[in-house]
Amino acid sequence: MNYVMKTCWGVVLLFVTLVPVAHADDFKLSSNQRISCSRGLSAGKLSTATCRSYAYLFNVKTTEYFRCSVSLALTRDNKEVINVQADGSCAKKPRIFDVDSSYSFDATETEPPNTNSFFGPGGYAVWASDNNTLKVRGCIIISSGLGSDIAKCIDMKFE
């Protein structure tokens, strides 16, 4: 029985020491976060402020990325805060490049919707570059207003 325990511990120790050898994908947070807030008045002299921010988490090896958003809504009257609600999540997006390498990434959100915005709730732009070769891809993603986003990516030409 003692021999069996030593063997089991040996196998466990072997797996524990081998796990760090496996290389995990590297994730980097985009450095271009934005926040936008809006205010509204409700019946009974209540006011509501809603703020939303987006960030991007990027896999530098595969170019898959996650678009993350966090929001906070605050409702108050003239004397006190009545309600605070917060929410957040990340949505996985497709790869930008088909081949694994070492990439850099950045993203930016469009301005919030206004009277000049013809494409509804807005969109975002992402840029990715290969750290090993002269390769840059720019993508613009906007909401079609019909349930799906429209995304177009262009490979940059170096002249």
Image (cartoon, rainbow, N blue to C red):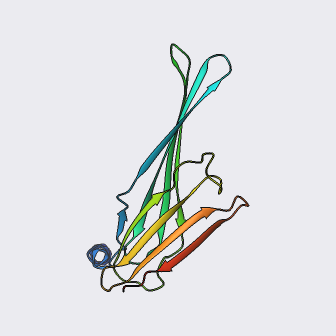
The percent position of residue 148, horizontal first and vertical second, equals 68, 64
Of residues 84 and 48, the one drawn nearer to the viewer in this rendering? 48
Of residues 25 and 35, the one drawn nearer to the viewer in this rendering? 35
Q: Residue at x 37, y 61 (%)?
A: 30
Give the farthest residue toward the right.
146
Which quarter of the figure has residue 47?
A: top right
Relative to 55, residue 106 above or below = below
Of residues 139 and 31, the one drawn nearer to the viewer in this rendering? 139
Q: Residue at x 48, y 84 (%)?
A: 98
Quadrant housing the C terminus: bottom left
Give the farthest residue toward the top.
79
On the rendered structure, is 60 left or right of 69? Answer: left
Quadrant housing the N terminus: bottom left
Relative to 94, residue 76 above or below = above
The percent position of residue 58, horizontal first and vertical second, equals 41, 67
On the rendered structure, is 8 left or right of 49? Answer: left
User: How many marks do you count on the picture?
Assistant: 0
Q: Residue at x 34, y 71 (%)?
A: 26
The percent position of residue 92, horizontal first and vertical second, equals 53, 65
Q: Residue at x 49, y 64 (%)?
A: 125
Which quarter of the figure has residue 76?
A: top right
